[in-house]
Amino acid sequence: MGSGPISSRQTEPHAHNARFDPSGKRLLAADLGTDDIFIYDIAGDGSLRPSSPPSLEMPAGSGPRHFVFSPDSRYVLGLGEMSGTITTFAFDPIDAKPLSTVSTMAAGVADDAPRSSAEILFHPMLPVVYCSNRGPHEIAVFDFDTATGAVKRRSAIQCGGQVPRNFRLSPDGRFLLVANEGSNNVAVFTVDSKTGDLSPTKYKIDVPSPNCIKFVGDQSP
């Protein structure tokens, strides 16, 4: 049970994303309706029980949609769909209170501008984080401080279509593919091997309302 301060979206729980932690001993679930990322211990029989602490407390009204673990498993980054923010938590050991919250949007964007942040991922080899913002139809690029967990927006690039609901990095980190749900296409970008910066290519694949991309053998959510 629970709710959040945004009455149009948060009158009740709304589980949006779940994944195992790197140890495989816990399951975390982002609840857009309550502004929590709930944490469950996995018992020997596979059943779930609330962990301690029972949740990571996202900022009120943020509407957590997706989250991702840092490659060294020390941090969790929660993406607020409604607020357009990334909130960082310590995960080793777990701390329910956030270390920091930063905007996914460009400086100076109006408070009432559409955000609708959707996906967040780490580059597999670089200290770089990406997120999709469906409001401005962009993929934003962030530097990640591996020592402190700090996230800083560096740049953004237009997504190659409309409403970038999901995207995926190739396992070798060389390409980023964006599922543009609103324009019925998957757009392909190259990734700079040293900086993680994105460059558009001429390649687009026509797909009706794409909302998720998977590479063969990819076990991530």
Image (cartoon, rainbow, N blue to C red):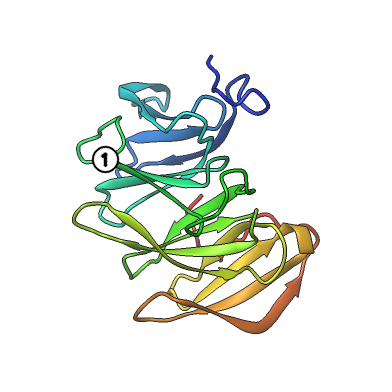
Residue in the image at 29% along x and 47% along y: 75
Residue in the image at 47% along x and 33% along y: 29
- How far from the left and from the top, in percent, is residue 149? 26, 52
Q: In front here: 110 or 98?
A: 110
Mark 1 nearby-residue class (10 Å; few <14, some 14–19, many ≥20): some
Residue in the image at 31% along x and 65% along y: 127
Residue type highlighted by circle 1: Phe
The residue labelled by disc 1 is 91
Kindly give the residue lying farthest to the right in the view shown.
208
Tell me which corner region of the image, top left, top right, bottom left or bottom right, holds residue 10: top right
- How far from the left and from the top, in percent, is residue 120? 48, 54
Is 80 displayed left or right of 57 in the figure?
A: right
- SS for dot 1: loop
Kindly give the residue lying farthest to the top in the view shown.
1
- How far from the left and from the top, in percent, is residue 189? 57, 77
Is 35 displayed left or right of 164 in the figure?
A: left
Is 137 displayed left or right of 184 in the figure?
A: left
Is 201 displayed left or right of 191 in the figure?
A: right
Kindly give the residue lying farthest to the bottom in the view shown.
202
Q: Classify 164 as above or below 28.
A: below
Q: In front here: 208 or 109?
A: 109
Tell me which corner region of the image, top left, top right, bottom left or bottom right, holds residue 90: top left
- How far from the left and from the top, in percent, is residue 81? 56, 43
The image shows a total of numbered marks equal to: 1
Residue in the image at 50% along x and 71% along y: 170
Q: Classify 71 as above or below 79.
A: below
